Image: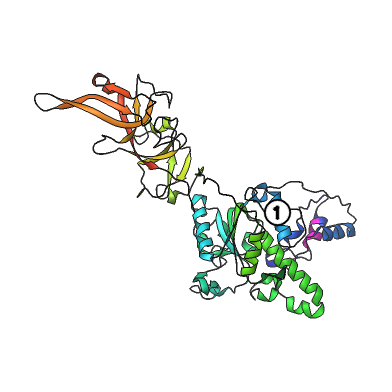
Amino acid sequence: MKSGLYSNLGENQILEIIQAARFSIFFVDDRQRVHIKDIGSKAAIQKFAESCGAIVHTAKLSSQFRCNGSDGYLSWLDNTLQIKETANIRLSAEDYDFKIFSDPNQLFEAIKEKNKINNKARVVAGYCWDWNSKKSPNDYDIVLPEFHFKKRWNLNTDKNLWIIGDKSIEEIGCIHTCQGLELEYIGVIIGPDMRYENGQIITDVTQRSGNDQSVKGFKSFITHNKSKALQDADEIIKNTYRTLLTRGMKGCYVYCCDKALAEYLAAQLEPQHESVPELRIEPEVNDEVKYIDFLPLYSIRAACGYFGEGEIVDETGWMKVEGMGKLNRNMFIVQAVGHSMEPLIHDGDYYVFRANPAGSRQGKIVLAEHHNYYDPDYTGSYSIKTYTSKKSFDAEGNWAHEEIVLQPKNSNYSPIIIEEENADEFRIIREFIGILQPDKI
């Protein structure tokens, strides 16, 4: 391909690089050819280098960091798309998070949910739909009427910034805006240009949009050499989807327009065994979902410090919280330690507390700080227990705590009893709201 913006300068990028330097290094993936004019194969580089009198040395990269470093997933993809045969016939969930959706709306919502974490998830599609919104911004481009699904291509708004744009999650990217870039999760809509038929992956270049420049000139090419033209088109389409399907570092979610193709892909996956869902701790999340969908996780020492009272403490991470009403900045998460609150709370559970609790504390589970008392679970002066108190009244009706009892649920543990004269060595920090449950979605 030529150099310059939109390939408008020079003659040949390979030759230009070789002629401009005494020593050139090319990192090449022959399966990244996605344009009919692309020429950057190993064979082409060697040919042009030798024509310039250069000595060629080749080496193979033995590992990579694409797709969570899973070479197994890449080999499985080559075998499944029938690009080349490999030993990776079935894909295990342990290798890579790969899911197939029967509804594009569900795919889109799953990716949007992933994007809430750190704005590193997007949906892309094969270039099988015209770019209507370029001329009519209110029109939709990718339309699947049977699912009432309609979205716009990204190209007319954020352009090359689409992959990091704050609002571009609502738009769909294509090969030209994501090749060479990576996200944590990618959603891929495989269009009608690839289907499964009679045991074969069939590509159909006629299903590509006329706006797609990567196959421009194909009709002219096919009249001169039909066999070579169809071979090139097959390579470009498979390489396009291979590239799209490898943009996600942590996972790839797929919807296929061809039902038979979806069934074929599903048949190449190892059966998933029932496993206990895990709660995820995200190191960071977008500001707009903090205290809306996510709460901070604190160590008990940080939670019992001056959190909420002027001192800034560092969170361990952020966790998604559902089913506990409206979240706010007085709420946070602590991980349980020990067994004193079993069977209600188990060792390792994550539970939500609220700062500055109002009203009576009687019978409530609280996070407390106390001095001169020892809690075996937290090996110190912090406790998560059920609060009870006895009150005494004087002749004028004024009351005072006779004693405060921090009661464990587990009868094998002893309560912590705080006498009235030691009340100044004790304070309630937070009030228990509920236990986080693993995401079943």
Residue 14 among magenta residues: yes
Q: Give the quarter of the image for residue 237.
A: bottom right
Residue 334 among magenta residues: no
**Residue 120 appears anywhere in the view:** yes
In the picture, measured across the screen, residue 85 lies left or right of residue 96, that is right
The image shows a total of numbered marks equal to: 1
Q: Which residue in the rendered view is the most extreme toward the left?
A: 396
Residue 210, x across and y down, in percent: 65, 76
Q: Which residue in the rendered view is the most extreme toward the front?
A: 411
Quarter containing the N terminus = bottom right
Q: Residue at x 88, y 58 (%)?
A: 52
Q: Depth check: 329 or 8 in front?
A: 329
- Establish if 169 lies above or below 391: below
Residue 135, x across and y down, in percent: 54, 75
Question: Secondary structure under badge 1?
Answer: helix
Write down the region rendered in magenta.
Answer: 9-17
Question: For mark 1, what is the residue?
Answer: 74
Q: Residue at x 67, y 58 (%)?
A: 268
Residue 301, x across and y down, in percent: 42, 29
Amino acid at pointer 1: Leu
**Residue 141 appears anywhere in the view:** no
Residue 233, x across and y down, in percent: 74, 70
- Establish if 146 lies above or below 46: below
In the picture, measured across the screen, residue 379 lies left or right of residue 118, that is left
